[in-house]
Image (tube, rainbow, N blue to C red):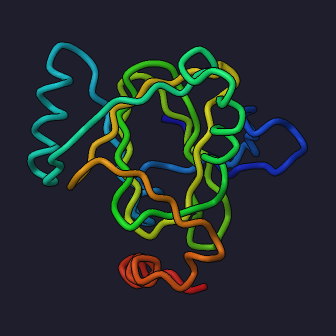
Amino acid sequence: MKAYVFEKSEEDQREPHNSGTYVSAEDLAQIGVLYWQFNGEDALDRINDLAAERKYKNRDEIIVSPEAMGPVYEEKVKSFFAEHLHEDEEIRYILDGSGYFDVRDKNDVWIRIHLERGEMIVLPAGMYHRFTTDAKNYIKAMRLFKEDPQWTPINRPLADENQHRFDYLKTFNITV
């Protein structure tokens, strides 16, 4: 995992936008982002153990690429990049390819997290974030869910008054 402050520019969202100011896994944990790396023959066993520990009951797989999604690819990637939150954790294990998850830090600054094959991330319910593929335009991910698989984004600013947003801010001692 590589995490750093996102540098705003006119470049395509799939470019690195690397400001050169790096962020550690410990810093990410302070805002609720959890990270693991599972490689090797026992990767699936370790994911299954973590899923049982965190009570993830369901999973599926998604491929985000022009080949897999066809003509709707560009539109979908743009929609994933809209700032939003979920009312449950967002859990992703990267099976192949790579992409970016951007999250807001305690000062509302975007932090870009680049994930590759074998890496897993958990974003807490109520955290503003967005996703995009990188310039390779291909990622295959396992999505894990506590209940039935669903992906319901609530875009900002509509989510500002959401109870899950309030709970997130209180849990991680964030003032806005």
Location of residue 56 with respect to 17 vertically, above or below = below
At x 63% / y 60%, what residue is drawn?
83
Query: In the displayed structure, does residue 93 sit left or right of residue 106?
Result: left
For the image, the number of numbered tags is: 0
* 140 on left or right of 107: left
Which corner quadrant of the image does residue 120 belong to? Answer: top left
Question: Could you tell me which residue is drawn at 53 percent across and 66 percent down?
Answer: 154
Where does the image place residue 13, in percent across and percent down from the top left? 75, 39
Question: Taking 104 as reference, is 71 left or right?
Answer: right
Task: Kindly identify the residue that appears in the image at 58 percent across and 22 percent down.
Answer: 65
Q: Quadrant of residue 132?
A: top right
Quadrant for the C terminus in the image = bottom right
Q: x, y (%) of residue 1? A: 48, 35
Whole-percent x, y for residue 139 in the image: 51, 24
In front: 108, or 22? Answer: 108
**Residue shown at 13% from the left, 54% from the top:** 55
